[in-house]
Amino acid sequence: MKYLLNLRVAITVNRITIGFFFFLSGIANYLNFNVANGFYQTVITQKLQIIGPGIPPGWEGVGPLPWLIAIPYAWLLPLAEILLGALFALNYWVRWTGLLLILMTFSIILAFGIIPAGTLFPNGAESFNKNILFMTLIWICIAYDAYEQKMSRRRTEAMANYAVNNAMDDM
Amino acid sequence: MQQASQATVILGGGFAGLFTALHLSQRNYSHPIILIEQRDRFSFKPLLYELLSGELHSAQVYPRYNELLASSSVTFVQDTVKSIHLEQSQVTVASGRIFNYRNLVLALGSKTTYFNTPGAAEYAMPFTSGEQAIALRKHLRHRLHQAIQTSDPARRRLLLTVAIIGAGPAGIELACTLADLLPIWYDELGGDAAEIRVVLINRNKEILKGDVNSHLRCTAQRALKGRIIPVDFLFDAAVSKIQADGVEYQQNNKTQILQAGTIAWTAGTAANPLLMNLPVANNRGRLLVTPTLQLPDFPEVFAAGDCAADSDQPQPPTAQVAYQQGIAIAQNIQRQREGKSPIPVEIKMRGTLMKLGLNEGVANLFNKVQIPGQPGHLIREATYLQLLPNAAHNRKITTEWLTDELFQRHRPASYMQLGQTPWLPGVATLAAGVIFATPLVWRAAQPMQFQQNLHWTGVPTLLNQLAPPAR
Ligand SMILES: Cc1cc2nc3c(=O)[nH]c(=O)nc-3n(C[C@H](O)[C@H](O)[C@H](O)COP(=O)(O)OP(=O)(O)OC[C@H]3O[C@@H](n4cnc5c(N)ncnc54)[C@H](O)[C@@H]3O)c2cc1C
C-alpha cells in the first residue's frame, strides 16, 4: 500500500505507461505503413476536421495536407513517436518530450476530428487506450492526495519535536 | 643534526606543498622530505561544494594526510609553523620543535580576510577548507530543521535566508549549489521549498570582477537565475557590519539590514602573516620569486601557490597553477641537488571550470570554447578528480565517482528532483531509438528489398507476424 500511495511511483508508472504507448504506436504505424487504409494512406488523404470521419455529410473538414508537408510528416511521425515515447518513458527531457507528444497528439486529434465518431464522450463504445490512460491518471490523483496528507503529518510532527528539542538544540 | 640539515622542509600541505612532497617522493629523492601542515586532512578546495552537498564524501575530497602519504617517503608533521629564519635555515613550530633544512618550500597559501568588518569573524562562516564546508552543511541543516518547526512566518523567513558575501567564483559557485540543494533538502523535510532565499551580496555591480573567470560572467549570471530557487542579487552593497542574524550594508548612501539565518563569507583573501615578516620582497604579501620559483636572495628557498608571485609572469591564485608549480619545484630541487641549474617553470593554463549548481557547470577550455550545462559539469568533475593527489587514491576515487555518476548513488538529489536529464544516457537513448526504428523504416519504404536482404535474420518474418494481415 505504501508503494501504491507513493507520488513518485504513481507518476513514474504513468510516465512509463504513456511513453510506452507512444513507442508502441510508432512501431505499429511503421508496421501498418503501406497496407490499404494504413498509416501512410490515412495521413496523405485525411482532412482536418471538427467532427470525425463518417458523420455528417458536409462536415468533412479541410485538406488533405499538401504533399510537401504530408509525406515528411507521415515518415517522421512514427519515428518521433518511437524516440519521444522512449525518452518520455525513461524520464529524459520530460518537459520537452512531453510538450512535443502533446502537440503530436493534438495534430492527430485534429486530423481525425475533434469530436470523433468513436466519440470523446462516454457512449458505451470501448476505447482501450482511453481507459488505460484514465486509470493511470486517476492513480496520480490518489497518490497526490496521500502525499498531501503525509506532508501535513510531517509538519505536525516537526512542530511537536520543536517543543521538546528547542532548548537544547540551538547552536 | 647532520641528517636534519639535509632535509627538504615543505611548509603547508595545500596544492603547492603536497604536490611538491609527492613528486619529490616519486622521483626517488634520496634526502629526507618533511611536510609541515597544521591540519590533519587535505582540503581539495575546488570540490568543497561537492563535500557540502554530499555529491562526494570526505574520503574523496577531504582525505587524511597519513593516508595520502602512506606509500611515500614523506614525513608528515602536523603542527603550526610559528617562525621562519631564512638566515639560519631554520623553522620553528608551535610545539617548540626546530627544523633545520637544506631546502625550504614555502607553500602556506593565503588566509581569509574580513577587511575589519565588525562581527564578520564571529558570525560569518568562511568556506575555504573541508572543516568549514562540513560546518556550513551542519549549520544549514540545523537552520532548515528549525525553520520547519517554526510557525512564525517572519522567523521562518530569516532562518531560510542565506546571505553569501562576495560574488567572486567561490561566492557564485556556493550560491548556485545552495540554490539547488536547499530547496531539495527542505522539501525532504516536508517544507515549502519556495520559502528558501539565497542572496548574493557584492560590493560593486559586476560579478567575477578582475577574476580569471570574468568572461564567464554572462553564463554565470544566467545560471544563478536558473536554479531551482533563483539567486537574488544585492549588488553595489558595501557590507558594514555582520550581526548574529543579519548583514548590515550601505547601498545608495543608506544603511540597510538583510535578515539572514546563515551568512557565508567568500569575499577576500589576504597574505599569510608569517610571510610578511620575512626579509624578502613581496607584492601585497605574495613573495616575489624568480621564474624558477626561488627567492632571489635565498636560492635554496622555493615558494609557490597563493603565497608566491613571479612579477614577470604573474599567475592567478588557483589550484591549477599551484599544483603545476609544486611539480616543477620537485624537479628543480632535485636538479639543484644533482648540481644542475633549476629551470624556469612553464604553467599551462587549460582554461577554467566552474560549478554552477548541482549537476551543472561550465568548462571554459583554453579560454576559447565554453561548454555549459551537464557536459560542462562532467568535464569539470572529471578534470578535478584526475588532479586528486596520489595516483592510487586518484584511480579509486575516479572509479567511485564514475560509478556514482552512472548509477547515481550518493547523490544529494536525483535528476528527477532537479528536473534534469543525464546527458549521456539521454543521447544514447536517442541513438538506440534511431537504430531500433531503422529496420521498421526500411520495411515500410522498400518491403521487398528488406525481405530479401534480412531474410536470414528472421526479423522480416517476425515483423510480418506482428503486423496485421493485409485487409
Ligand atoms: C572555495 C574555493 C574554491 C576554489 N575553487 C577553485 C577552482 O575551482 N579552481 C582553481 O584552480 N582554484 C580554486 N580555488 C583556489 C585554490 O584552491 C587555491 O589557489 C589553492 O588551494 C592554492 O594552493 P596553495 O598550496 O598555495 O595554498 P592552500 O591550498 O591554501 O594551502 C596552504 C596550506 O598551508 C597550511 N598552513 C597555513 N598556515 C600554516 C601554518 N602557519 N602552519 C602550518 N600550516 C599552515 C594550510 O592549512 C593549508 O593546508 C578555490 C579556493 C576556494 C577557497
Image (tube, grey):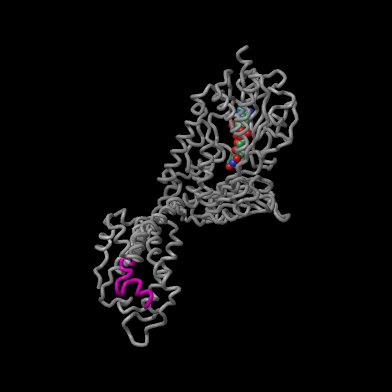
* Residue B133 figure quarter: top right
Q: At 53% across and 21% down in the image, what residue appears?
A: B73
Q: At 63% across and 30% down in the image, what residue appears?
A: B107
| Ligand 1 - quadrant of the structure image | top right
Q: Horizontal placement of B6 versus B439: left or right?
A: right
Label count reads: 0
Q: Magenta stretch?
A: A29-45
Query: Percent x, y for residue A64?
Result: 40, 79
Asked if B52 appears above or below B64 in the picture, the reply is below
* Residue B434 figure quarter: bottom left
Q: Which sits in the foreground, A54 or A51? A: A54
**Residue A139 visible in this rendered orientation of the protein:** no
Q: Horizontal placement of B383 versus B407: left or right?
A: right
Q: Is residue B360 magenta?
A: no
Q: Horizontal placement of B322 versus A52: left or right?
A: right
Q: Which sits in the foreground, B150 or B77? A: B77
Query: Percent x, y for residue B387?
Result: 54, 36
Query: Percent x, y for residue B341?
Result: 68, 23
Q: Is residue A42 magenta?
A: yes
Query: Percent x, y for residue B110?
Result: 65, 35
* Residue A30 figure quarter: bottom left
Asked if B308 appears above or below B217 in the picture, the reply is above
Q: Which sits in the foreground, B178 or B295? A: B295
Name the quadrant of the C terminus of chain B. bottom left
Q: Residue furthest top?
A: B2
Name the quadrant of the N terminus of chain B. top right
Asked if B69 appears above or below B234 in the picture, the reply is above
**Residue B14 visible in this rendered orientation of the protein:** yes
